[in-house]
Structure formats: structure tokens, C-alpha cells
């Protein structure tokens, strides 16, 4: 089976490199993946794989092998692009002004389509069912994963586990990386408005200065991370925007702050929200101001199930050799894959796409991000191998 999958992945690789070029040239923003979803449906139809639509632009395929009730494995790919102007000079460069597949979701969609074709072709040779999840809106709250779960993507049939692959521009092509347990952070957005009383800057005693209050608040919020959190528990609080005032001699009425709060522990995450609320409200009030505070709760942290991790390591070693399997570093970035891994055992792993010799080193979310496309053959084959062989 492994050898068959490898040879089909090699045989089909050029076809799927073309597919990736098409997707790359036609990127769509989160929740607007209409053409991408249609393209995926067309391909599944071509392969003879039944599918249904969920969350408007999500496409859920189902491939039944022998004894389809024996087990169900879910494989997930995200499909959305980013509001970035592409700067790569390549024949398949984005044709859409200001929109680019800068996070490699074109590659993820391609790899899952390729795996689907192979799994469908070999369906008399593996047992169980594979659920293909082509997901919208990974890059934007509330996260396509949460919408698909609400619409029952993890039911009928319920998968026993789920795999998601993500390109990794810091990992050499030909390698993959995995990590057990906590692997990525939760991400919540902070929106704070501090209301004071504006006036002449020469008469601060007649004003309530929201700029001074904001300054204290920005500094004080850091004590939540440095004094309330266990130092062994990774967490980040960053205030990333401050807006208020426009000239030298006027104290403004209000200041707006934005920021992000990230955590790896769900208990600490919600305790920290309470601390942020308490401290902000009390501090601003004590200085005479008023506050509007919104914590927009985003994606949960990504947790890789230990048992599934062990299985995935063996499968990866089968496919690319143990020497090419590395450990993923922990990151404070976020992924809506966390929603799935809260519900069922999940494994979110990385596909190496870097090639220093060819100058392919740009990070994701940058205008020059690209991949070494020989990674596509590996991605297709690995997803197919997981779908055909994992038992949990
Ligand atoms: Zn991204
Ligand atoms: Zn991504």
C-alpha cells in the first residue's frame, strides 16, 4: 500500500502542481472562497467522490473504503488567502489585486485533492472511511472550523481523529515536523476605548487625560503576564495599536487601544480575561476615566493528542524516513485547527517547503512567500498514507 501511494503521488505530482498554480493565481479572502469551493467540487466530481456543502464555502467529501463503518479518519485543508499584494515574479502570480495565498492554503487544498484522488483510486485496498474537509475562513474570526463544527462536520460519520497539514517555510523541503501536546496558542483580540475629558493642554487640571491613563494601562497590563502567570506557562499580551489625539496643545477626549492575548492553557486563558477586565476597569476608573473593553474570543490553543502523535511519527518515518522527521517548535501563533482538536484527537503537523539554494525562504504572511513545489508530492502522499492506514 505504501509503495502504491508513493508511486501514485509521484505520477500525479505534475497534475497537482498545475492545480496549485491555478489556486495560487486565483486567491480568495476568508469566507469568500466561492470559486475555490467550486473548483474543489469540480475536481471531486471528476474523481467520482461524493461531497456536501457546509458553512457556505466549505466542501466535505467522503471516500468509503472496504468495511466503511470500521473507522473514520478526517483530513483537513484550509482554502482562504490573505489581504496581501503578492511581490513574487512567477508565471502563476496572483491575478487579484491585494489578495495572495501567502499562508500556503493553496498548497494545503492541493495536497488534500491529491490525497483524495489516490485514496479513491485505492479504495478497495484500505478499510474504513476518509472524510475530506475543505475548510473556509482559517485566517479570520470566528474561524471556518468553528462554523463547520456547528454544522455537524464531526458527525455522520464521526471521525475518530483528524489530521491537518501546514506548510513550514523554516523547514527544509523533504522534511516534516510534529509535536505532541500543546503546539500553538489561543488568540483573543483586545479592543479598549478610554474615555476622558478633552481640553486645552495648558489646563490639564480641567481635563481627564486619556493619553496618560492609556500609558499607565499599557504598562500595567504587562503585570498580568509577569506577575499572575506561572512562568512555565507560555503566554503573550501585546498592545499593538494606540490611537488618540492629533496635535500638541489639545488633550483629546479618548484613546483607543488594540492588542492580542495568547495562551497555551485554556484555564489560564479565561482567568487572564478576568484579570484584564478587572485591572483595566479599576485603573481607568481610579484615574477618573471611563472604559469600553471588548475581548473578542478567538481560536483555542492547538493540542496534539499524544497517542495520535506517536502514530503519526511512525507513518511519517514510513513515508520519508525517520531522519527527515523533526520536532515542531512551540509557537504563539494561532490556528483554528484548535477547534477540531478540542472535540476529537487531532494532529497538526508541518510540511517542509524551504529551499535555501533556490532562495525560497520567505515566511508565511509576507508578499514574497513561496514554496519548493517538490513538497506537493510529499504532502499528497503523506495525507493519503494517513487516510489509508491510521487506526485509532
Ligand atoms: Zn496564516
Ligand atoms: Zn495558514
Image: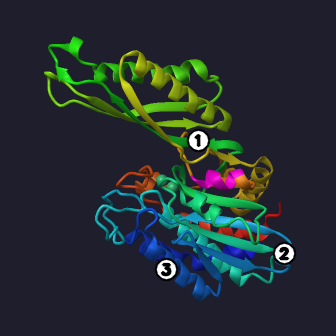
Overall secondary structure of the magenta stretch?
A: helix
Please determine whether, in this image, residue 135 is positioned above or below residue 336. Answer: below
**Residue drawn at (28%, 65%), measured in percent from left and top?**
97
Q: Which residue is mark 3?
A: 38
**Residue drawn at (81%, 74%), measured in percent from left and top?**
128
Q: Residues within 10 Å of mark 1 (few under 14, many from 20)?
A: many
**Residue drawn at (40%, 29%), measured in percent from left and top?**
291
Q: Can you say which quadrant of the picture contains the C terminus?
A: bottom right
Report if residue 341 lies within the magenta region. yes
Distance between the alpha carbons at the discs numbered 1 and 3: 32 Å
Please determine whether, in this image, residue 319 is positioned above or below residue 21. Answer: above
Q: Of the residues under marks 2 and 3, which one precedes in the sequence?
A: 3
Tell me the number on the disc at residue 69.
2
SS at mark 3?
helix
Of residue 171 and residue 256, the one placed in the foreground of this image is: 256
Can I make out residue 18 in this image? yes
Q: Which residue is mark 1?
A: 185
Amino acid at each position: 500500500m505504501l509503495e502504491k501511494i508513493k508511486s501514485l503521488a509521484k505520477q500525479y505530482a505534475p497534475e497537482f502542481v498545475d492545480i496549485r498554480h491555478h489556486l495560487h493565481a486565483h486567491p480568495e479572502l476568508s469566507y469568500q472562497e466561492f470559486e475555490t469551493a467550486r473548483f474543489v467540487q469540480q475536481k471531486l466530481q471528476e474523481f467520482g467522490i461524493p461531497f456536501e456543502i457546509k458553512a457556505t464555502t466549505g466542501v466535505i467529501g467522503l471516500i468509503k473504503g472496504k468495511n466503511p463503518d470500521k473507522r473514520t479518519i478526517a483530513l483537513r485543508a484550509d482554502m482562504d488567502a490573505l489581504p496581501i499584494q503578492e511581490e513574487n515574479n512567477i508565471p502563476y502570480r496572483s491575478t487579484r489585486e491585494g489578495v495572495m495565498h501567502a499562508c500556503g492554503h493553496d498548497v494545503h487544498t492541493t495536497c488534500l485533492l491529491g490525497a483524495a484522488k489516490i485514496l479513491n483510486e485505492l479504495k478497495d485496498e484500505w478499510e474504513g472511511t476518509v472524510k475530506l474537509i475543505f475548510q473556509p475562513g482559517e485566517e479570520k474570526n470566528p474561524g471556518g472550523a468553528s462554523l463547520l463544527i456547528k454544522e455537524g462536520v464531526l458527525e455522520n460519520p464521526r471521525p475518530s481523529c483528524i489530521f491537518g497539514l501546514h506548510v513550514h517555510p523554516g523547514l527544509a523541503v523533504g522534511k516534516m515536523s510534529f509535536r505532541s501536546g500543546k503546539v500553538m496558542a489561543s488568540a483573543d483580540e483586545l479592543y479598549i476605548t478610554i474615555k476622558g475629558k478633552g481640553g486645552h493642554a495648558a489646563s490639564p487640571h480641567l481635563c481627564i487625560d486619556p493619553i496618560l491613563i492609556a500609558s499607565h494601562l499599557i504598562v500595567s497590563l504587562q503585570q498580568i503576564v509577569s506577575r499572575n502567570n506561572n512562568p512555565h506557562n507560555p503566554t503573550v499580551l501585546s498592545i499593538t495599536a494606540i490611537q488618540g489625539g492629533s496635535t500638541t496643545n489639545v488633550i483629546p477626549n479618548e484613546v483607543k487601544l488594540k492588542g492580542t492575548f495568547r495562551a497555551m492553557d485554556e484555564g489560564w486563558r479565561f482567568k487572564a480575561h478576568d484579570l484584564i477586565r478587572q485591572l483595566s476597569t479599576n485603573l481607568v476608573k481610579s484615574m477618573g476615566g471611563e472604559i469600553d473593553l471588548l475581548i473578542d474570543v478567538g481560536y483555542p490553543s492547538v493540542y496534539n493528542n499524544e497517542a495520535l502523535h506517536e502514530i503519526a511519527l511512525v507513518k511519517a518515518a514510513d513515508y520519508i524516513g525517520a531522519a527527515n522527521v523533526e520536532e515542531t517548535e512551540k509557537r504563539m501563533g494561532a490556528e483554528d485547527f484548535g477547534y477540531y482538536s478540542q472535540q476529537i484527537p487531532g494532529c497538526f503537523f508541518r510540511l517542509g517547503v524551504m529551499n535555501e539554494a533556490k532562495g525560497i525562504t520567505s515566511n508565511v504572511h509576507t508578499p514574497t512567500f513561496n514554496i519548493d513545489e517538490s513538497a506537493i508530492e510529499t504532502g499528497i502522499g503523506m495525507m493519503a498514507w494517513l487516510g489509508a492506514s491510521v487506526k485509532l
